[in-house]
Amino acid sequence: MDLPIRIQTEPGTERVVSVDGSWGAPGLHLSHWPGNATPRELKHDLSTGIALHFARLPARDRERLARGCVALANNHYDSDGACAMFAAHRPEAALPLASELLAIAAAGDFFQVPSEQAFAACATLEALAEPGRSPIASALAGTTGRERYELATRAAVQRLPAIARGDLEEYRPLWEADLEALRADRADLARAALDDLVHLDLRIWVAAPGATSTRRGAPARFDPGRHALFADGRADRVLAVGPARAGTTYRLVLGTLSWFDLAAPRTQPRPDLAALARRLDELEGTRREDEAAWRCQSASGASPELWFGKAEMESFSEHAGEALCPSALDATRVKSALIDALRAAWAFPEDEAEELPFSLR
């Protein structure tokens, strides 16, 4: 669509095409974010998929849906948003690359690894907005967050045809180290024991006693990254367990599949991470003010975590790093508490529980 691209964080009064984000702006929504008003016939798990559905419409239908809109807007910058913006802005160029764009978007928003090329392309797009690494660093110098994201979005839309095709050699410094770390993480998981609790949408990876991550520069503990943990998208919650002589490390990550507005929503409710952390502190004999204790991020966030260790961990961290500390609790007690929390999340009145196609007892 021949509309300007903008980053917009306030609803405003002008009609815009809200691409990926959802912040209450009037106009057309092409978004999978919570609170969106995307037309039902355009729904897809990813905003990129929604924008591709929009791109496939006849031009007259696109114009009708976007009537009165003055810009293509997003309220943040990421790979799914960039791919969706490309599809909405340049449909003729995007449609032949639909599968590649969806793979890149899944690597970003779902932490999946449809292919190493998609992972590298996603890392490249994310780096476009990082002033210290971006190929457009000179343009980003001195900009605000909104200005930086707008410049990065425009650069992504311009460069995406080549990036999506896999022409990534010129961007090697942006993705090579990440890909090397991913390969090491996946190799480490291949040596770990895996327990799939499909009915709880949970995967549990348990390393061999004393095993540590083999990626370059990793702390001496078992700490596989998010993309390795969610690579195949088979579960929305993953627990990584690292037994060692000094104790066992634990990192529980809830994926984004239970946060985004999917075309076919996940039915598993999220556990109360704060209550689970309190319960584990009771079992551990620790308190929140201790240097090492059971910590969690808000369960209302897009992809929150629970871990034993220090309080500092950024949202969406690829690795837990120095935040992890050894816990004295054995894995059986931690897994039991986690499973209790997952079951407790299924709290229905009796009349609603009777309508479910399975038993919670």
Image (tube, grey):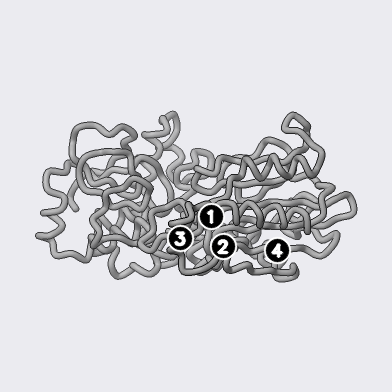
Element type at mark 1? loop
Query: Mark 4 or mark 3, which is nearer to you?
Result: 3
CB atoms of marks 4 and 3 within 8 Å: no
Q: Would you place residue 291 above or below residue 79 in this image?
A: above
Dot in front, 4 or 1: 1
Say the numbered circle drawn on residue 266: 3
**98 to the left or right of 179:** left
Q: Secondary structure at mark 4?
A: strand
Give coordinates of residue 146: x percent, y percent. 38, 34
**Which residue shows up at 59% across the image and 57% down it?**
237
Q: Quadrant of residue 336?
A: bottom right
Q: Amino acid at mark 1?
A: Trp
Label 1, on which residue? 346
The answer to whether residue 68 is left or right of residue 187 is: left
Q: CA distance from mark 4 to mark 3?
A: 22 Å
Return the residue at label 4. Answer: 205
- Residue 170 appears in the picture as rendered: no
Q: Earlier in the sequence, mark 3 or mark 1?
A: 3
Cβ atoms under marks 3 and 2 closer than 8 Å: no
> Contact, CB < 8 Å: mark 4 with mark 2?
no
